[in-house]
Amino acid sequence: MAGEIIYSDIKFTCRTESDAPQSQVSHDYKHDESGSGGTNPAAARLGLQGKKSGSVVAVWVLLCVCVLLVGVVVSLGVFYAKQQEKDLQSYQHLNRSNITVETSWLKKQLSLCNRSLSDATNSNRGCKACPPGWEFGVGKCYYFSNDSLPWNKSAGNCITMGGHLVIINSEEEQLFLLQTMKNKMIDNEDKFWIGLSDAEHESRWIWMDKTPLKKNVMFWLRTSEAKEPDNWTDNDKYPEGEDCARMGEKGKEIKKYSWYDAFCWKTLKRVCEGLAATQTCKQ
Ligand SMILES: [Ca+2]
Ligand SMILES: [Ca+2]
């Protein structure tokens, strides 16, 4: 019997699962996982509880992440709204500045327009300042005399009055003079001296201010019967000829080409010309 071992007096205690200490169960579970390959219900329940705890944690984490995201979105929204408000205020300020500049410019333009309109209105009303007895037209003052004088005395008289015998610089001025003197001619000899002469050099016509007569602004009479200037001598009765210019003839149709040369010693009426002074027209 050598080498043989006999076990006896062995007690077996029967325990329920609930009696087993937790540490033992844990030991058994670990033991089971370590390689026995068997299934342990307690361990399975513990695994399930672990999974549930993990899920709860994940939910909380997700919840926190969502809260953070919502916070970020709200913050961005507030920031964007404030930025929009700042941009809007900046845009409104810029617009106000531009409007102020444009308004100032428009006021200046309006002032210039009003001044031009006032000048034009005054001009149309003949409100340019001319001396008493003088008439306003085409930007100047004109004096149509009632008395008659030779050309030289007429020239001197105009200078004494502060002007000079008229110098005609345009077709407009020529037509204005014709139209105005039409109503002032009563007798057939109501003709008017103008400031043009060739007394110094025959056929070299010069104005009172010593400027030569321009070919594009001269209105000598041109008809089938007469062509002026003709330096008429009356059959050499006046060999010096006609050296002074006149215009206007009663009873004749107003024609643009109406100048004559005439004897300077003849006594005729005259047209003096002077500068007009601008002034505000009284209403
Ligand atoms: Ca002449
Ligand atoms: Ca003549």
Image (cartoon, rainbow, N blue to C red):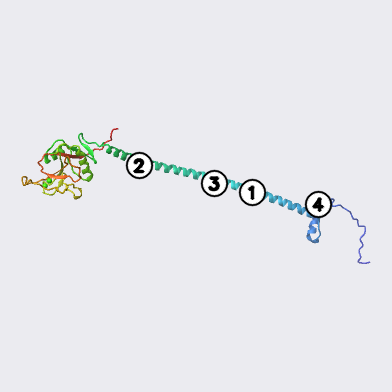
Expressed as whole percent of the image width and height from the top left, the position of residue 257 reads: 19, 46
Query: Which amino acid type is shown beneath numbered disc 1?
Result: Cys
Q: Disc number at residue 22?
A: 4
Are the two marked residues, 4 and 1, in contact with CB atoms closer than 8 angstroms? no
Between the C-alphas of marks 3 and 4, the distance is 59 Å
Q: Closer to the observer: label 2 or label 4?
A: 2
Measured along the vertical axis of the image, is residue 281 above or below residue 5?
above
Q: Residues within 10 Å of mark 4 (few under 14, many from 20)?
A: few
Expressed as whole percent of the image width and height from the top left, the position of residue 251 reads: 17, 40
Residue at position x 66%, y 50% in the image: 62
- Provide the secondary structure element on which disc 4 rests: helix
Between the C-alphas of marks 1 and 2, the distance is 63 Å
Between the C-alphas of marks 4 and 1, the distance is 39 Å
Q: Quadrant of the C terminus?
A: top left
Q: Closer to the observer: label 3 or label 4?
A: 3
Expressed as whole percent of the image width and height from the top left, the position of residue 130 reads: 22, 36
